[in-house]
Amino acid sequence: MSIRPLVILPDPLLRQVSKPLERVDDGVRRLADDMLETMYDAPGIGLAAIQIGEPVRLLVIDLAKDDAPKNPQVFINPEILDSSDDRSVYEEGCLSIPDYYADVERPAGVRVRYLDRLGQEQEIAADGLLATCLQHEIDHLNGVLFIDHISRLKRDIVVRKFRKIAKDKAPARVA
Ligand code: ZN
């Protein structure tokens, strides 16, 4: 397993739509393990493959509290089957948009179909933080970021800030 570099806003990769995985093999499981290690190191509670530059429909989540045993969950080709009418608000953050947090309103519950790390089809009815986290990560697979769910004004401010950071970090060009 290895920790992989994170893709950070405004990298255009974050806007790419990821492709379904055709089979679940050792390569996919290795990628999932790298994602988990990268997520734990960050630390974060969810990560989509595109956030380490792999445009495939794979995401990992672990909502275990700090003092609890790890509970890694792997979702391959996840699909939202149903969303509840009632909505909830969580303060969200994203490893690709470091140190920025904002309240996001989403359906409070979702039913998701996916393949597990053995390639077996599973269905989960999620609510609470897991429902929000699944929706946030599935958005990534479609090139959507949580800042797309906040006001345009707030989004423009954060995008401008990250553009400037990226520009300041870029190596100076020698003529
Ligand atoms: Zn994210």
Image (tube, rainbow, N blue to C red):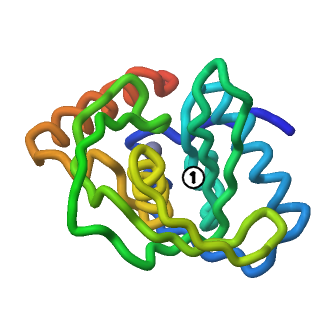
Q: Nearer the viewer, residue 135 or 166?
A: 135
Residue 56 in view of the camera? yes
Q: Position of residue 59 (x, y in %)?
A: 61, 55
Q: Quadrant of the N terminus?
A: top right
Whole-percent x and y of residue 35? 70, 44
Q: Residue at x 21, y 61 (%)?
A: 86
CB of mark 1 near ligand 1 (< 8 Å): yes
Counting every numbered tag in the picture gives 1
Can the viewer see residue 175 in this picture?
no
* Circle 1 crowding by C-alpha within 10 Å: few under 14, some 14–19, many from 20: many
Q: Which residue is mark 1?
A: 48
Q: Name the residue rendered at 22%, 50% in the picture.
A: 105
Q: Where does the image place residue 22, in percent across and percent down from the top left?
A: 74, 81
* Residue nearest the observer in this picture, 34 or 107: 107
Q: Residue at x 63, y 50 (%)?
A: 60
Q: Secondary structure at mark 1?
A: strand
- Left or right placement of residue 157 versus residue 72 in this view: left
Three-letter code, disc 1: Ala
